[in-house]
Image (spheres, rainbow, N blue to C red):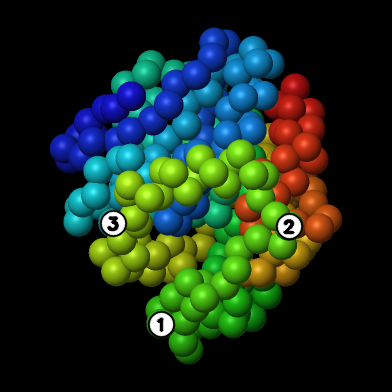
Amino acid sequence: MEFITSDGVKLSYDDVGNGRPVLIMTGFAGYREIWRSQVKILSQSGFRVINLDRRNHGKSETTTKGLRMSRQGKDVHELLDYLNLDKVDIMGNSMGASVIWAYCSLYGDSRLSHIISVDQSPKMISDSTWQFGMLDLTWDNFPDASEKMYDVHTTFKKINDETFKLVKEASAGRKFDYRLNRPLLFDHTFQDWRDVISLISSPILFLAGEESPFWNPKHAVVSSKIAPNGRSLIVPECGHIIMAEQQDVFNKAMLDFLG
């Protein structure tokens, strides 16, 4: 399915199942097929699952417009309006989680029921106030060190075979343009969402992979204490792509939280 944003960009999404709506977004350079297991179990459990390829990702249109986190948040707002959705559960991995904070910074959380952040630190640059940034990224080497993430193997445990096959098929026809999306990555790494999270009243579950290659997993615990209704879970034997590396553990935590 597709819809057109207010700045004329065509976004692609799946809309599966009936019931309480859940919006899902994956991370930088990701494809929505990575959520195969979650779409299946949520739709079987009485949820309506909207799985979005963000602009420049997956099957959505590639554009030079709106390569910033605020526009990503606005895209979410316009999709919720287009589908006439309210009281939405929302879930994002990596940059997909930061898109949730971008949305909340612009529109608040009144339309959101539950939020799940999957292995994403709310602040990617380490400094005296935050020790859970990405790799060795600091203000001294920003933004160049941001691109070191390209050399990192994101997983610790093998991704589910069926999910891996779907992602490979999707990426074969739609290669992600890293050079074009450099401004989006830099804007993403620049952000500090802690003040936004502190104002969100909706329950938030912060998940982290114990073996995440990007940051200390304790970011989830610390972030949960910033949120008025936060909780955290560090998943053992898992890297950055928790939902595909530890599907059973993730799905149980997800369903228990959405309850």
Q: Nearer the viewer, residue 62 or 161?
A: 161
Q: Which mark is residue 144?
A: 1
Residue 152: % across, % down: 57, 72
Residue 228: % across, % down: 70, 43
Query: At numbered mark 1, what does the secondary structure look like: helix, strand or loop?
Result: helix
Residue 6: % across, % down: 20, 35
Q: Identify the residue shown where x is 50% and y is 19%.
A: 16
Q: Identify the residue shown where x is 34% and y is 65%.
A: 178
Query: Badge 3 local density, few (<14 within 10 Å), some, or many (20+)?
Result: many
Residue identifier under label 3: 67
Query: Would you place residue 1 above or below residue 129 in this image?
Result: above
Query: At numbered mark 3, what does the secondary structure look like: helix, strand or loop?
Result: loop
- 64 sits to left or right of 119: left
Of the two numbered discs 1 and 2 on the same chain, state the one appearing first in sequence.
1
Q: Nearer the viewer, residue 167 or 99?
A: 167
Q: Identify the residue shown where x is 39% and y is 65%.
A: 185
Q: Residue 87: which quarter of the image? A: top right
Amino acid, disc 3 = Leu
Amino acid, disc 2 = Lys
Query: Would you place residue 114 above or below residue 228 in this image?
Result: above
Residue 100 visible in the picture: no
- 108 sits to left or right of 223: left
- 201 sits to left or right of 29: right
Among all residues in the image, which is located at the extreme bottom?
140
Q: Residue 213: which quarter of the image? A: bottom right
Residue identifier under label 2: 157
